[in-house]
Image (cartoon, grey):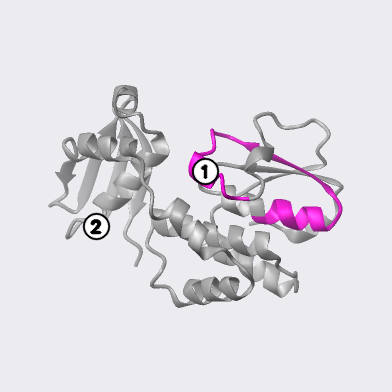
Amino acid sequence: MVELDQINENKHIVLIANNETFSLANVLYTYILTLHKKVSLVATQEIDKKFVFLPWFDKVRKIVPSSGDIKIELNLDTLRLYQEFQSHSIKMNEKIATSFYSSFLVEDGLKSILCEDKKLSAMSELITLGADCKTCNEFLKSSKSLALFRLKSLLFANFVLKNEAKVVEVYIDEAMLKQSGAKLTDALLVAQELLEIIHVHKVVLIQKDENKILKEIKVEN
């Protein structure tokens, strides 16, 4: 959880994000600039081009600057940060609103959230604040890469049902990623889709070469 007081107490804030949390990093980057503080944005992986519409896409670094006073590693918990902004009465401009809205869409891509009243209400409020929902949807919802579909065909052909068809084990390796041109984040999207199989309660994504569990996704109660 991001503590906004930590931001207020330091001069140079380093935000550390990945593809899942990049939208929230844009929220905080914009907010920190309004405080007239120095901010750096570091990515732990190559940021997907689908996020190019976000305001600080071209500010991403690969190395953590030594001059930073505090490092904040972001978690994908959009509603909590949104509520914290509200509790601190922080004014949200169009950049912040759009970044928040896109983060909700990222969450929905990993686990369906659009049936949750609080999150739907927040997204509606963000639109009134100027969130560019049309652009967010075009980049994050309406366009899926050919690589993703290639990887999907490979993974769909190789998953295994276990525990009376309640658990799906799906195996992936570097060869599959190279063959499809996809990324590991694409595999997570496919794993999430497998969770929609009737009676399945859990999907386990496993690195085939090392028999290592990369991710477990469960049905939320």
User: Where is the N terminus found, in terms of image quarters?
Assistant: bottom right
Identify the residue at the far left of this view.
164
Q: Position of residue 54 (x, y in %)?
A: 60, 50
Q: Position of residue 137 (x, y in %)?
A: 45, 59
**What residue is shown at x 66% (from left), y 46% (from top)?**
56
Residue 61 sits above or below residue 125 on the image:
above
The earlier-in-sequence mark between 1 and 2 is 1
Label 2: which residue?
196
Q: Is residue 42 one of those drawn in magenta?
A: yes
Instruction: Locate residue 183: give its quadrant.
Output: top left
Instruction: Locate residue 111: give its quadrant.
Output: bottom left
- The disc placed on residue 19 is 1
Q: Please, what secondary structure does the residue beneath circle 1 have?
A: loop
Q: Position of residue 177 (x, y in %)?
A: 34, 28
**Label 1 to label 2: alpha-carbon separation:** 23 Å
For disc 2, the neighbor class at 10 Å (few under 14, some 14 to 19, many from 20) is few
**What residue is shown at x 71% (from left), y 51% (from top)?**
29
**Labels 1 & 2 near each other (Cβ < 8 A):** no
Task: Determine whether, in the image, residue 150 is placed left or right of residue 77.
Answer: left
Chain part drawn in magenta: 27-54
Q: Is residue 215 one of those drawn in magenta?
A: no
**What residue is shown at x 56% (from left), y 44% (from top)?**
52
Task: Determine whether, in the image, residue 100 is placed left or right of residue 146.
Answer: right
**Which sits in the foreground, 201 or 159?**
159
- The disc placed on residue 143 is none
Instruction: Locate residue 181: give its quadrant.
Output: top left
**Which sits in the foreground, 202 or 146?**
146
What amino acid is at disc 1? Asn
**What residue is shown at x 32% (from left), y 51% (from top)?**
192
